Amino acid sequence: MKIRHHHQKSRPWFLTVKLGAILTAACITGVLTVNTSAFANTFDSSTNTSIRIQNPQDWQQVWQILTLTGYVHLVYGTYMGRYGGMHTVAAWNIPVPQALQKISNNWGYSPYNPAFRSGLIQFERADHLLNRRGISRGRVTPEVLSALRAPIPKNRFPFQWIKVEKSTHPEHLQIWQVSPDPQGKGQWIYRTVVNTGVMHSTPDGSWPIYQRLAKTTMTGKFPIAVSPQEYHLLPASDRSIYHGYHVRWQHYTAPNVHFVNYFYDGRAIHFYPRKGYGWPQSAGCVEEPYQNARKVYALLHYGDIVSVMGHYHRKPVKLDRAALLRKKIIREIAASKAS
């Protein structure tokens, strides 16, 4: 099985693939070759089911199994640089955008890796360990280990990456999809304008979707910026320093929130009615217009990876010539009075 990644090197470099107990060392130029012969007697590629698997005991063994059965599309390698330093690189067996390649290089080989957790959640869904409205955190549980000892159902879900971009104006969301076909090609399939959270309440990072609800009621606290003087007059329970801002916390209840995809600590991609979209307005969620949210909800699945990237920059307002002339006159009048 060959796994290609985007950052090609013109010179060979020594690389060791981290795939649990499967370690392949090779001198390569831009192509990572993973030796799966060690698992040839445990996996039937024609049926995509487990035939004979030793009892998995830890997350490394689970990563092996989920990689060979199409739920995880990522392994990690280390290579020695020109001056002897060791570097880690993410090697995908599917085409991914450069932005995803870049951030996944830093995810690391651990049970908290977003791609590994994504595969776990999709396996739970396929094996009916996770019901329609259930919640999964993407962890190796006794139920998962038990299910992996039985024939493994084929992963029928496409790989999907949701990129939430805060640094461009307007803020937007894009969906990258790779079909489950072994020769599947990647492509951007949808884009929509969105709102993220005020005061950086939608943090940067990558997480898998862990719960999906067609409709729900949301409750929480919304941060409202206040002056330092007002801040000190508030009860301690209603105030805090939040991301460098003095804030007053306002409780809210939002019933009938539609098309909800939870991805991190109560934050979700969902519909919410606003007069406009494209800049921070929420308490931390990623908000969409109704029809766009409906479309996104139909496209997404449990386990899809959501990456929030960048920082919002307010678009400069372009003044017309009349407005500029007025400002100039006002400055001249003020200067004449001062003199």
Image: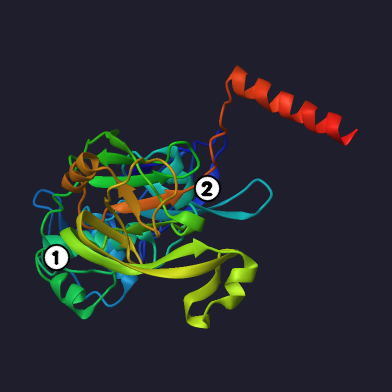
N-term mark: 2 or 1 = 1
Say which element carries label 1: loop
Q: Which of 1 and 209 is in front in this view?
A: 209
Q: Can residue 98 be seen in this view?
A: yes
Name the residue that disc number 1 marks: 133
Q: Which colour scheme is used?
A: rainbow
Q: Name the residue under label 2.
A: 311
Nearer to us in this view, 79 or 331: 331
In the rendered image, residue 108, in percent from the top left (x then y), is placed at 46, 60
User: Is 166 on the left-hand or right-hand side of 42?
Assistant: right
Q: Which residue shows up at 8% across the image and 52% down it?
A: 47
Would you say 200 lies left or right of 329 here? left
Could you tell me which secondary element the residue under label 2 belongs to?
Answer: loop
Residue 177 higher or lower than 263, as above or below: above
x, y (%) of residue 330? 72, 29
Which amino acid type is marked by label 2? His
Q: Toward the viewer: 193 or 187? A: 193
Give the residue at x 14% y 65%.
Answer: 133
